[in-house]
Amino acid sequence: MTAAVLRPGQRKTGERSTGRTLSERVFRVRETGILVVLVLFVAVTAGLQHRFLSASNVQFVLVNTTIYALLALGETMVVVSRNVDLSVGSVLGMSAYLSADLFGGHRGIPIVVVFLAGLGIGLGWGIVNGLLVAAGRVPSLVVTLATLYIIRGADILIVGGGMVTANTLPAAFTGIPKATVGGIPDLAIVVAAVIAAGAYYLRTYRSGRELYAIGSNPDAARLAGIPAGRRILTAFAVSGALAGVAGVLWAAQYGTVDSTAGTSYELTVVTAVVVGGVAIFGGSGSVVGAALGALLLSTINSALYVLGISSFWDQAIAGFLLIFAISIDRVIQVRLTAALRQRSARRAE
Amino acid sequence: MQSENVRERLPWLFRWETALAIIVAAIAVIGASASPQFLTANNLFNLGLSNGEIAIMVLPMTLIIITGEIDLSVASILGMSSCLLGYLWERHWPMIVIFVVIALVGLAAGAVNGLLITRLGLPSLAVTIGTLTLYAGVAQILLGPTTVANFPAAYTNLGVNAVPGTGNALTYSTLAFAVLALIFGVVLHATPVGRGIFAMGASPEAALFAGIRVKRIKTILFMISGLVCAFAGVLYTFRLSTAVANNGVGLELDVVAIVLVGGISIFGGKGSILGAVLGVLAFAGIQNALLLTNFNQEASGVVAGGLLLVSVFLPGTRPLWRRIAAHSRGRVAVRKAA
Amino acid sequence: MRLRRATWLALPLLIVSPLLAACSSSSNGSSPTQASSSSGTSGSLKTGLKVFVIPKNLGNSYFTTSDSAKSGGALAAVQQLGESGSETSGTADTPSSQIPAIQAAISKGANALVLSATDPNALCPTLESAMKRGISVVTFDSDAPSCRDLFINQASSQALGASEVDLLAKQIGESGQIAVVSASADDTNQNVWISYMKQELKKYPKMSLVSVVYGNDDTATSTQVTQGLLEQYPDLKGIISPTTVGLPAAAAVLDTAKYRGKVALTGLGTPDEMKQYVADGTVKSFELWNPADLGYLAAYAAVELSSGKITGAQGQTFTAGKLGTFTVGSDHQVLLGAPFVFTSANINTFNF
């Protein structure tokens, strides 16, 4: 599914618009697809075990998803541009510890400052990743694999044998994931709004759409005048910043932070993103889809428990789902490309 | 220019493998001077034990990355084969039959990867992340929370004894690694198949037009990777005399890092088995030297990541230096013109 | 250009090598000396022995307390006795991560190893080769039963398992469903304690153990398995989490109006991480021992062994500095003492 490259300020008319509308329609079909799977899944599970939809379980699932959803938002931006960010788990871990530790060292520090600190840590590492990828021209798989090691290693060094314990955190902070309105956690609403904002940016703003262009054909994008380096740097910076914020939320949710926070999260995030319809080679996919992918994975995880199926099936199901999702995407892509070709061939006649 | 002449006459001097060989030699020298135990037979034995399985998995990964793909499921195949070994042993299957089953499962696991990638045209990064999760899940389903540890000493002794007749430094896994490295090296560098593998990575379309059976070779490579990783899983289980669901978790990152440090390009089309072997030595050597010299073990991740960055960044910065040089030359020219 | 690349690579190594050389000439604790048998100052214990303390993994605050000199743990004992020692291990709680550290310790001329085993069997080849070389191997906290000279147990496993159940039973009126949030499936001590818990449960016919789940000593996993328990068993009355990672994770889940006081929680935890939950009533009481004392005792036992003063046979006694006298029990075990119960009355007097 390749999004057509738009020149700045171009009005979308004629052929181009039909092609784009067709792609747009496919985007929405994909997102709707996950939504349908999700709803079906929830319905079947709730039918077998009504406790699945109990208020407390819904809250558990939604809160557990928020961190992955934030990570998925940043990861989508990176993946869409034909890159990958494997360092998100390590960034989350470092941010979780360092920001939560601020409460212990500085009594009465405003919670907002702690969030900003976490965001700053993530942003810093994101910029490092972005610079290495964009300016250093090193493949992002390699860069973020290396920073995964380095950041986790630095985190272990910094934390040593220490940890942040719940009694050093103000109640207002640890209460953040617990606050609900009408049974829905506040946190879920806020994150949903952030996801929506991210989706709007990627869909509407030129710099957002250019990420898709870079992902679907980097050389053509550069020739078209898109400042690829800057866009990629921004994508990594945002991914890092979101991972930093997710780290602070992690600390608020779990209350106890040591050097293992966030380990292996990057795998789950990439899985969620790909299940959500984002092509691993860039150029297509949506943030909403990625967030739905994260929600689907959390829901499955919870369903296994509620249904009494051994939770040891969780990983196997997630892996199978990923393979199934990309196979479906591939089939759709082949059909779509064929359809687009037919359409332009017909128009040419 | 003088340097151009040298480059023509002694091209091998300027390759990554040479630099890596110098690094490995330097590690050996520094390690030996910092700790008298570094080059002892006993320490080399321990090195072989701890890194043998990873080293073995590096070999098929090298070929796969040269073709432009990647296989992130290697550690999960190791874990799955380990749990299968435990599962069947608990049910009193004869060991020989278990070995055959594990080999077949390894081949099948690799075939799943290969077919999804070549027949469905799916990107290997996504597919193998999926199979990584899937096979790790299978490992968990097989053994659940239990551990199987009652393997006969005849097998678990490969974690204790050196290969007889070679002094006390060679582990069975190192021997297997050496043999496999030879085989893979010959195939990659001295056969038409090997040349085809390089061609596939450098230019998939040209390779197709040249009549190279890209899909078949890739599928076979993934199947070989599955088989080799399953074998590594058996070695791993016997060395630790324990089969448990989390055996091998996370090792795929180390394997990929080593291959990259070995100079194999992530884009495909470039690299050598020699580089992979040197990468194993460098990676393992550094970790071991750090252990022996009271280096803060908590920092070993930083060293590993740093090594990886250095190995990829330095060659990659040539375009950056060129651009900086061109930029400054450009500015000077503009000033002169003004 | 490429020739220069090789030089660039050599440069950082030239810079790093003096650092490595400098690092090797000092270690955590005290400067290394030859392992010589000199008549020491503390009775007939040898001095100058090399003792390596190898926890399950580095970066775990429980082990930092048990090992470090600052908290009065194993390395404090090592220093007091005039030996040299350092803490080493991998960073993952797995045998693959721990074994290289053990091997390195052996290579560096260890006289004694004090370790908490990541697995009861996987370490045996390495530990047996250590013992063959005359190295004293003492396990503490988590055992490798068939390949060590002594095991320093924090409390009798039977007493631990039983007391956990008793603590919970008191809180839930001795009737109802309970569950266990454990660590990892191959944890020696976890499985032993759970088996004793099941035995003790026979005393309470109205209580039933409905599930054992595994949090793998990972906070997020422990949280999710606890949530799963609550959803799967809506009538759950109590949870035992005998792991210092699982207990605060479970407490965080129960720390809401809905569950506080309705689902009881107890287990093993450090006072610092539980202060919050004891203060707000989520947890009424929980147990532990002093990890520093455990490490201290283990180090003393190792030095006694290595000096030849004891062989680890049943009935032998030895003194462990400030902790007093101890006797070796059956199966080469030495007990630190009874588990200590923390409640709101005493928790604030502790700082670890």
Image (cartoon, rainbow, N blue to C red):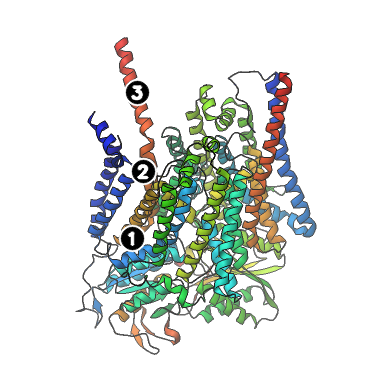
Where residue A31 appears, as percent x and y from the top left, is 70, 39
Any mark on residue A199, and which? none
Q: Are marks 3 and 2 on the same chain?
A: yes
The residue at which mark 1 appears reads as: B291
The kind of residue on which mark 1 rests is Leu
The kind of residue on which mark 3 rests is Ala
Vertical position of residue A249 compared to residue A47: above or below: above
The residue at which mark 2 appears reads as: B310
Nearest to the observer: residue C71 or residue B285: B285
Q: What is the CA distance from the residue labelled 3 to the residue labelled 1?
A: 45 Å
- Front tag of 1 and 2: 2
Query: Counting other residues with Cα less than 10 Å from the Cα at mark 3, is it few (<14), some (14-19), or many (20 or more)?
Result: few
Nearest to the observer: residue A10 or residue B228: B228
The residue at which mark 3 appears reads as: B326
Q: Are marks 3 and 1 on the same chain?
A: yes
Q: Quadrant where the N terminus of chain B lies? A: top left
Vertical position of residue B238 compared to residue A140: above or below: below
